[in-house]
Amino acid sequence: MSPALPEGTGVLLLGYGSPAGPEDLPGYLEEVLGRPPSAEMVTEYHRRYDLIGWSPQLRIITSLREKLERQLARDAAGTRVFLGTKHWKPHAEDTIPEAAEAGLRRLIAIPLSPYASPWILAPYERAIGAGQQRAKRPIEVELRSAWHTNPHWIGYWSDTIQRELARAPSGTVALLSAHSLPMRHAEAGDPYPNILKETAGLIAGAARPPLWDFTYQSAGNTTEPWLTPDITEKMVEWRDKGHAEQLVVPIGFVFEHLEVLYDLDQVIREYAEEQHIHYRRAPMPNDDDRLVQALYSVATGPTLPKAR
């Protein structure tokens, strides 16, 4: 069998990053904000992370790394998979020199978000450039994004929707949600809204839920406008149509973290109860084998086209 990846090529999985515990929180928030956080902000985020038992993100992406590395090693023994994050440890700009020092000449970098928005990708691109500059040996890094139409990604969500709706009461509406974005980015041409609508259409087309809609969630607490419709608006709209049974399907995210475990399972669940809506949430891909297969096909397949 020919190797899946050429000799000297590895894979770099890129994640957002999260604090592992309370001791990391001030430094993590400072990285995200670009300035020291206020004491009030640290206290508030400490409360949020306490509610969810702190973020499982690093554990999940570590498991993804291990599973993907094992699968790639079946084709070519010794193939390496690395982790790098935008914020906190392990930083991508530190991981790339490590890969070069290990003798790799090339990395295929895959963001752990399939949506090729400049809003998502720009920090990764900066981190890659910084990592290449720090490396003592030359190393090529190819960023492969825009995997939102990958059949394994679509298949995970379509199968999950079918399974969850089969367990839910008749008339349950599936609300496919994704992180909102400041409106100015979309007005400047960011393809993010179109990418998400394409993905939602493919998932719904495969799952064929009797009732479904697309929403945004987790808009920032700022004075500028963010993309709508917000999930709370859609929940009430569907309740008023007689559909209080609702399944939230967070297709905008790959694994459990604050936006899922707190924004949805805490804040939106509480809102739903107040509005006499029966909230349920579809399970996330996390380190599911379908996601591993999606990452494998992105790593070993041809270069992906840029998002339109």
Image: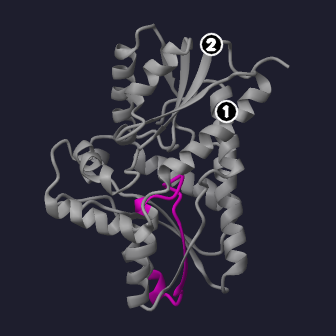
Q: Residue furthest top?
A: 137
Nearest the eye: 139 or 91: 91
Question: From the viewer's perspective, is 22 left or right of 259?
Answer: left
| Residue at 75% across, 22% down | 77
Q: Which residue is mark 2?
A: 8
Q: Nearer the viewer, residue 43 or 161?
A: 43
x, y (%) of residue 166? 73, 77
Q: Residues within 10 Å of mark 1 (few under 14, many from 20)?
A: many
Question: Disc 1 on helix, strand or loop?
Answer: helix
Q: Could you say where residue 99 lies in the image, as x and y percent from the top left?
A: 51, 20
Q: Amino acid at mark 2?
A: Gly
Q: Which residue is mark 1?
A: 69
**How far apart are the alpha carbons under marks 1 and 2?**
14 Å
Residue at 53% x, 54% y is: 255
> Magenta span covers which residues?
237-259
Tell me if residue 149 can be seen: no
